[in-house]
């Protein structure tokens, strides 16, 4: 009798546990069935206060730098109008011109009917009103004042065209070479200066709050970084004696007074470089080539390269070997 009672209890317990386990599985399956898996969507994205629900199929650009970036990112075929100053790459010149940011051809832009018009320079409010009334969104992307802000420009454009899933990755890929070149340039020299112009008072140099000044600081200490007058006197330049001097074309090394240049280390070692100012005024990843040439020359102390890159229109004024495009 006792054996039968024990067997009954064990059998009942097993049945109870089994039913509970089945019910638990059924409950889990029911919960999983109620869960809706939501996949990430590339849009909408918001850039500069504008929300984009899809990638714009047609775009106008009144900024040479932004036009070049759009081509780099692989969306040059979306451009239907551009600034008259957008001349790089060569394909950009085939796109109909629509004036400039300072003097835009509003009728021409409206006729081209881009879904989006982008610029780095301000457009008059009356012109923005006409454009928006014509169904054209207007976006201003600020000109960069540093290498970091330049990368942000690429990210903004890439988000607009590629959306939130692929946008950052595409921008990172586009800027990888320049980022590497700037990192490699760090510590190339102890000090340098980027001279933009020569005046009666001295040398107008790129300060730390400008793109040119930030760019110069990647190689070493920019002696004009904290300068508030924007002008270095000959005495200040001589006292600082920077190891590297960058000159904005059309300045040349011969523009520096010979008595002064003979006392400067940069001239003695051949570390004076003339740079096409458009690479600084409208910066893009093309800066990678010139950056490497400067840093490698300085690190190897080879000297002798007075011109790193100059505008093609002035190529005939310097030896052929010094005027080649370092990016080719």
Image: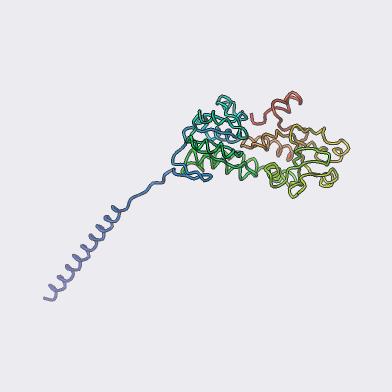
Quadrant (top left, top right, bottom left, bottom right) of the N terminus: bottom left
Q: Quadrant of residue 217?
A: top right
Quarter location, residue 105: top right
Residue shown at 71%/30% (left/top)? 310
Residue 292 appears at what percent x and percent y? Answer: 67, 37
Question: Viewed as shown, does residue 177 lie left or right of 30?
Answer: right
Q: Which residue is found at the position 73% from the left and 43% from the top?
A: 206
Instruction: Give the quadrant of residue 90.
Output: top right
As displayed, is residue 51 above or below residue 71? below
The residue nearer to you, when weighing 12 against 294, is 294
Residue 32 in the image: state x and y as whole percent. Answer: 30, 54
The residue lying toward the viewer, choosing from 52 and 4, is: 52
The structure's colour scheme is rainbow
Residue ID at (85%, 45%): 235
View extreme (bottom): residue = 2
76 up-or-down from 166: above or below: above
> Percent position (x, y) of residue 10?
18, 69
Q: How many marks?
A: 0
Which residue is more in the foreground, 279 or 326? Answer: 279
Furthest residue toward right? 259
* Left or right: 109 in relation to 16: right
Image quadrant in which the C terminus is located: top right
User: Of all residues shown, which one is farthest toward the front?
Assistant: 126
Image coordinates for residue 111, horizontal then vertical, percent:
50, 28
The answer to whether residue 270 is left or right of residue 166 is right
């Amino acid at each position: 009798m006792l054996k039968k009672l024990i067997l009954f209890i064990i059998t009942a317990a097993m049945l109870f546990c089994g039913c509970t386990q089945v019910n638990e599985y059924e409950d889990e399956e029911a919960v999983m069935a109620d869960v809706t898996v939501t996949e990430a969507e590339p849009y909408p994205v918001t850039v500069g206060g504008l929300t984009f629900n899809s990638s714009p199929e047609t775009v106008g650009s009144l900024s040479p730098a932004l036009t070049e970036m759009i081509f780099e990112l692989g969306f040059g075929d979306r451009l239907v109008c551009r600034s008259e100053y957008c001349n790089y790459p060569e394909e950009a010149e085939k796109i109909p011109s629509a004036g400039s940011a300072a003097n835009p051809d509003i009728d021409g832009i409206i006729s081209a009917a881009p879904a989006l018009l982008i610029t780095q320079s301000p457009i008059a409010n009356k012109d923005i009103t006409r454009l928006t009334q014509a169904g054209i969104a207007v976006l201003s992307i600020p000109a960069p004042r540093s290498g970091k802000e330049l990368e942000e420009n690429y990210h903004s454009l890439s988000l607009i065209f590629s959306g939130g899933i692929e946008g950052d990755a595409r921008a990172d890929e586009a800027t990888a070479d320049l980022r590497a070149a700037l990192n490699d340039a760090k510590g190339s020299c102890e000090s340098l200066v980027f001279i933009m112009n020569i005046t009666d008072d001295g040398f107008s140099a790129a300060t730390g709050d400008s793109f040119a000044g930030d760019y110069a600081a990647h190689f070493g200490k920019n002696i004009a970084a904290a300068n508030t007058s924007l002008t270095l006197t000959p005495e200040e330049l001589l006292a600082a004696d920077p190891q590297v001097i960058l000159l904005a074309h059309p300045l040349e090394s011969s523009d520096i007074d010979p008595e002064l240049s003979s006392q400067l280390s940069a001239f003695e070692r051949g570390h004076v470089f003339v740079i096409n100012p458009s690479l600084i005024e409208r910066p893009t990843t093309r800066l990678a080539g010139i950056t490497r040439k400067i840093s490698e020359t300085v690190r190897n102390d080879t000297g002798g390269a007075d011109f790193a890159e100059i505008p093609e229109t002035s190529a005939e004024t310097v030896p052929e070997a010094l005027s080649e495009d370092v990016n080719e």
